[in-house]
Image (tube, rainbow, N blue to C red):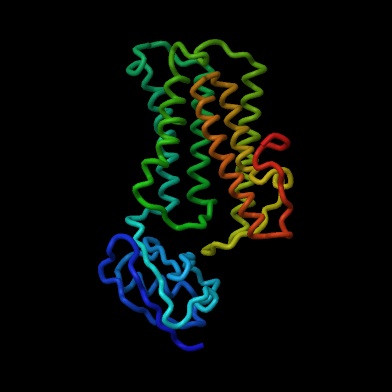
Amino acid sequence: MSEITLVVRPRGRPIKNLPETITVQADGVASQIHQKIADASRFSVHRLRVTKGSDGTPIANTKEATVHDTGLRNKSAIDVKDLGPQISWRTVFVIEYLGPLLIHPLVYYGRPLIYGSSEAPSELQKITLIMCVLHFLKREYETLLVHRFSAATMPARNIFKNSAHYWLLSGLNLAYWAYAPWAPTAGKSNPLITYSGIALFAVGEVLNFYTHIVLKNLRRPGTTERGIPRGIGFNLVTCPNYFFEIMAWIGVALVSWSLGTVVFLVVAATQMGAWGKKKERRYRKEFGDKYKKKRFAIFPGVF
């Protein structure tokens, strides 16, 4: 196929140096559209949203489809929007989990200053600290060495909103109430409840890690392709990774006996439920009859 010329139109805020037209190979990869606009405007490709002028359909920055596959033809119009400064999703996750990872030890060891008490932490408080630190260390490890992200970046301004959930709810909220001298964790433990909580936490964390490995192996490095996940839990619910995550936090709740832990757990489960339903709809749309539809997004027989 021959070269075609696309008419470039700004959408929203003005973009300096945005070309009025670009010339691309019709049988070339669709990502050349983004790259040519980025080179001319001196913006990162991740900062630009490109859509078809005819119907507003997003044009994917991919090498897995050609320009012709997108439906663009000679003299077709494309709209370009500046999404603003971006930050990588990997950096976002690292920052999100770093908050509680630092806050829990700070509150635990800062008890004399925070609560005005010289009383030594209880065994339950020590166990709660260990569980929370291990959880977020695991999350940081997965962020750096396991997860593969379908989107490279997000608007930098969203980092505050995304981090608030972890820094405030699972960080300050959970730590303040769990390590207080008057907290239920400051008293004696019920061995049956405590060991049950530890067991739930351990099993939940291990199986959550397993599901993340399964999801990682569905996507080749450097691609956004997806596959149908199979393995432990995936035949029962859409997102067993969320189910095992909640299981682990129920374990923390049984050990800490803190209302703050329950508040975080309820908020997190509600959000994961919404994500799970969205993912189920995406699987059904993307894979059609190849995908075995699930009735439950997270909890087998419940939700």
Q: Compare residues 8 and 269 and report the one nearer the observer.
A: 8
The one nearer the camera, 87 or 139, is 87
Residue at the image position 52 percent from the left and 16 percent from the top: 185
Q: List x then y, in percent, for residue 81.
A: 36, 63
Q: Residue furthest front?
A: 54
Say if 302 sits above or below 258 in the image: below
Residue at 62 percent of width and 26 percent of height: 198
Lateral position of residue 290 relative to residue 136, left or right: right
Say which residue appears at 45% left-offset and 45% top-offset.
Answer: 93
Most extreme residue toward the left is 16
Vertical placement of residue 250 versus 289, above or below: above
Q: Where is residue 147 drawn, in percent x and y?
A: 53, 51
Q: Is residue 41 above or below residue 73?
A: above
Residue 220: x and y, percent? 58, 62
> Is residue 293 left or right of 44 when viewed as pictured?
right
Q: Is residue 2 above or below residue 270?
A: below
| Quarter occupied by the C terminus | top right
